[in-house]
Image (cartoon, helix red, strand yellow):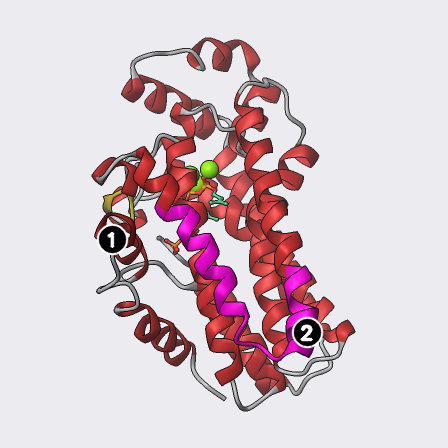
């Protein structure tokens, strides 16, 4: 069994100079900028851990894992344009450092590179894994569309929100696990359980991202605190605040002074104890993930890296 850090290193080693010498630099330099340095590598590590649950040898899963990380980073380039985000991982976003056209085209190239990595698989495994990846990639687009649509809709239900974050975020974590397990030789039902585990983890993960976007520390989180508030993102925080105190929240949604908007809305969240409410939700989804993990018919010892990974995510500040 490998350790989490060893998996992370395998991905980092692969990506550190993959794009250093490719031309034209206008296309590849932003890709190198985003891929070679930074990021928690959650999706590729999940893929490798899932593979390792069923197989001592994880070599076949490395390129697909790199593909998953490349795909994830492609979504970030486009997401940052869509969200008007200027900072990621404590650095300027690609569209800010270069321009929007660069972020669009380098992002497109990354998606193609992501697919390319999957073709290292045997035809039999590829035939199982590619439909999962394709469906997931399209679901991420669907989630992103709901995310943007919801900015303009005042009343979103918790159910609609959960569906949106399942699509934009959870399915990619889940598919990373399912794909890794499949490459490792898992039976279909086992790979499906890994997927379900990933959905619960992914919902907790996005709820936590939304929590940190308001209540995190900019220095460690690496993104601008209050970005979701500025964009009227229908996070569960805002959904609950609208449901509980519409009169006070409504005028603030069109407030032009950004720091006043962030401050006033955060104050309302705190007054309504929504920080605690969200933390409880996050906890309940992590618990669900732990239960699914416990139900897997795999030796307990083999589950330990996934259990400790869950704990790392739960206690994250970035
Ligand atoms: C950011 O994902 C986008 C979300 C789904 C919240 P991560 O938090 O995994 O981003 P990096 O790759 O570690 O920076
Ligand atoms: C991102 O959600 C989901 C995808 C990139 C597909 P967010 O917009 O909340 O992610 P961050 O906060 O910018 O990382
Ligand atoms: Mg964003
Ligand atoms: Mg977004
Ligand atoms: Mg976010």
- Magenta segment boundaries in residue numbering: 106-132
Query: Mark 1: is the Cβ under 8 angstroms from ligand 1?
Result: no
The one nearer the camera, 127 or 205, is 127
Relative to 23, 250 lies left or right: right
Q: Which residue is mark 1?
A: 24
User: At 69% from the left edge and 67% from the top edge, which residue is drawn?
Assistant: 292
- In the figure, 179 relative to 108: above or below? below
Graded by Cα atoms within 10 Å as few (under 14), some (14 to 19) or many (20 or more), the crowding at tag 1 reads few
Q: What's the residue at 51%, 65% (across, down)?
A: 310
Left or right of 39 on screen, residue 309: right
Identify the image quadrant of residue 234. Answer: top right
Q: Residue at x 56, y 59 (%)?
A: 173
Q: Position of residue 117 (x, y in %)?
A: 48, 68
Q: Residue at x 33, y 35 (%)?
A: 101
Q: Are marks 2 and 1 in contact (CB under 8 Å)?
A: no
Q: Residue furthest right?
A: 189
Magenta-span inclusion, residue 112: yes
- Residue 29: image x %, image y %? 24, 53
Element type where label 2 sits in the image: helix
Identify residue for label 2. Answer: 294
Can residue 152 be seen at all in this image of the molecule? Answer: yes
Residue 69 marker: none
């Amino acid at each position: 069994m490998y350790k989490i850090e060893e998996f992370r290193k395998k991905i980092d080693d692969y990506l550190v100079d993959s794009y250093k010498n490719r031309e034209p630099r206008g296309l590849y330099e932003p890709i190198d900028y985003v891929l070679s340095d930074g990021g928690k590598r959650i999706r590729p590590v999940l893929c490798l851990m899932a593979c390792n649950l069923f197989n001592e040898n994880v070599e076949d899963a490395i390129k697909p894992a790199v593909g998953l990380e490349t795909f994830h980073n492609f979504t970030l380039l486009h997401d940052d344009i869509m969200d008007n985000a200027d900072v990621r991982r404590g650095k300027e976003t690609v569209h800010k450092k270069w321009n929007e056209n660069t972020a669009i085209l380098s992002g497109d190239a990354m998606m193609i590179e992501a697919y390319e990595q999957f073709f290292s698989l045997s035809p039999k495994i590829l035939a199982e894994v590619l439909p999962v990846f394709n469906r997931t990639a399209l679901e991420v687009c669907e989630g992103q569309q709901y995310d943007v649509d919801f900015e303009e809709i005042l009343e979103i239900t918790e159910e609609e929100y959960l569906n949106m974050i399942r699509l934009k975020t959870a399915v990619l974590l889940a598919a990373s696990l399912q794909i890794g397990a499949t490459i490792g030789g898992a039976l279909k039902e086992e790979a499906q359980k890994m997927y379900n585990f990933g959905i619960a983890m992914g919902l907790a993960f996005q709820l936590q991202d939304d929590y940190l976007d308001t209540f995190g520390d900019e220095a460690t989180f690496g993104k601008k605190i209050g970005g979701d508030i500025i964009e009227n993102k229908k996070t569960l925080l805002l959904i609950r605040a609208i449901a509980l105190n519409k009169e006070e929240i409504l005028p603030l949604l069109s407030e032009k002074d950004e720091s006043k908007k962030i401050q006033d809305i955060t104050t309302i969240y705190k007054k309504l104890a929504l920080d605690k409410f969200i933390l409880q939700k996050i906890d309940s989804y992590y618990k669900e993930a732990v239960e699914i993990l416990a139900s897997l018919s795999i030796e307990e010892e083999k589950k330990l890296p996934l259990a400790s990974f869950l704990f790392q995510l739960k206690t994250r500040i970035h």
